[in-house]
Amino acid sequence: MHNFDIEKPSSVSEAVAALAAEGAQALAGGQTLIPTMKQRLAAPEKLVLLSGIEELKGISASGGKLTIGAATTHAEVAADGSYPALSALAADIGDPAVRNRGTIGGSLANNDPSADYPAAVLASNAVVNTNKRAIAADDFFVGMFETALDEGEIITSVEFPLPEAASYQKIDQPASRFALVGVFVAKGANGWRVAVTGASNEGVFRWSAAEEALNGGGSLEGMAPDADGMIDDIHGSAAYRAHLVGVLTRRAVAAA
Amino acid sequence: MISVTMTVNGKPVSGAVEGRTLLVDFLRETAGLTGTHVGCDTSQCGACTIHVNGRAVKSCTMLAAEADGAEIATIEGMANPDGSLGVIQAAFKEHHGLQCGFCTPGMVMSAASLLAENRNPSEAEIREYLEGNICRCTGYHNIVKAIQAAAAQLG
């Protein structure tokens, strides 16, 4: 790993000021960025540690909404339980030690195409709050490892409207334990939303055909999305992933 | 250089580190505690598992600078004050929970973390909790037996 400077802000405004420097990057829980830096796939000149910022931590529920601070760890979300499908998702990320460091904000800002949280945020129609604006889930995820965040913009919290029913089902890639395919379904005020992670070259996406079937009272039997554009690698072909999306969506709806 | 101070197994340890200094390297090289092992250096194997403020963490995937002010526990802190083996360590010895021993420090620290959260884990819960700890000798069966025995003894 190349060397770098470190700043430890204690507020969001200090962090934003520190991130304005050339070559600066935010470090949340570090469970992706530190391994990435060890491989020299990232070499920031300065890391701005978000872990000491109290205003980014904690979980609160009110008015049918669950608000989770960006620096809240997976273990803390897993232990919360006020949105059971979300807590179950968090409890199955990585392993216990990773869950004690990794954060929801870090996962969302990275937008790994096989990460779990993006599926929950997109299916739940959550809102991603940053230091300067509120971004709807539908606008937040732009593509593989790409989000709507500007340079130096920090996620501060995520607001989940609590759904009537929800479930996350995934098949792990057996070596990395990332999702080979994961499907989050949630029934909210405007009906069902279905979000798929791990499958597409473009990252997390909504499977609109399944949503239309669910909201129109139709059946998902035999349905699968087009395999075009699905990830095709040694762990699973594009056709296999498309098939899994159908299977896991049906399982998720049955479990929700 | 960045100066850091942390409490390691109840004793204060200070040092000057680079930004990139990993917590595991600080513990091994500055604190001189070489019981914590670096197995894979890619956060997969869990040999470097320690406790930071009471929670299991992979010390190869945390910067020393991030641990400034933290309470750290390592495998060296698992022994009794008189130097004899602690309950979990003794159970690993008794039940042959180690073969080459390389993964053992991380296994013991994960086991301690599990038993702090769940005093009476089932075999399935033990195996699931050890998902991030890899034993190259594949000696999982006796590791699980050792943790079950330690759980019974700690009751």
Image (spheres, coloured by chain):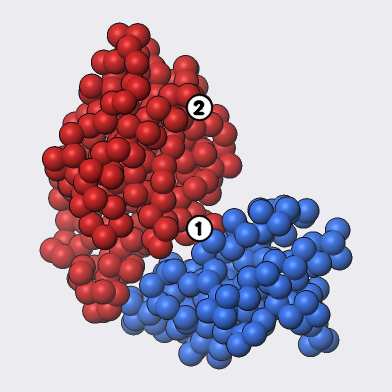
Chain colours: A red, B blue
Is residue A13 at least partly visible in the picture?
no
Instruction: Locate residue A25: give its quadrant.
Output: bottom left
Nearest to the observer: residue A84 or residue B71? A84
Horizontal side of residue B26 vs B84, given as left or right: left
Q: Residue beneath label 1, please?
A: A95
Whether A211 is drawn above or below A94: the answer is: above
Question: Which residue type carries mark 1?
Answer: Asp
Q: Please state the chain letter of the residue tagged with numbered disc 2 in the rendered image.
A: A
Q: Is mark 1 on a helix, strand or loop?
A: loop
Percent position (x, y) of residue A207? 25, 28
Percent position (x, y) of residue A254? 48, 24
Whether A208 is drawn above or below B106: the answer is: above
Horizontal side of residue A65 vs B107, given as left or right: left
Horizontal side of residue A191 vs A151, given as left or right: right
Kindly identify the residue that appears in the image at 34 percent across and 49 percent down. Answer: A180
Whether A33 is drawn above or below B9: the answer is: above
Kindly identify the residue that appears in the image at 52 percent across and 64 percent down. Answer: B132
Image quadrant in which the N terminus of chain A is located: bottom left
Q: Residue beneath label 2, please?
A: A255
Q: Distance between the residues labelled 2 and 1?
A: 24 Å
Nearest to the observer: residue B152 or residue A65? B152
Question: Which residue type carries mark 2?
Answer: Ala
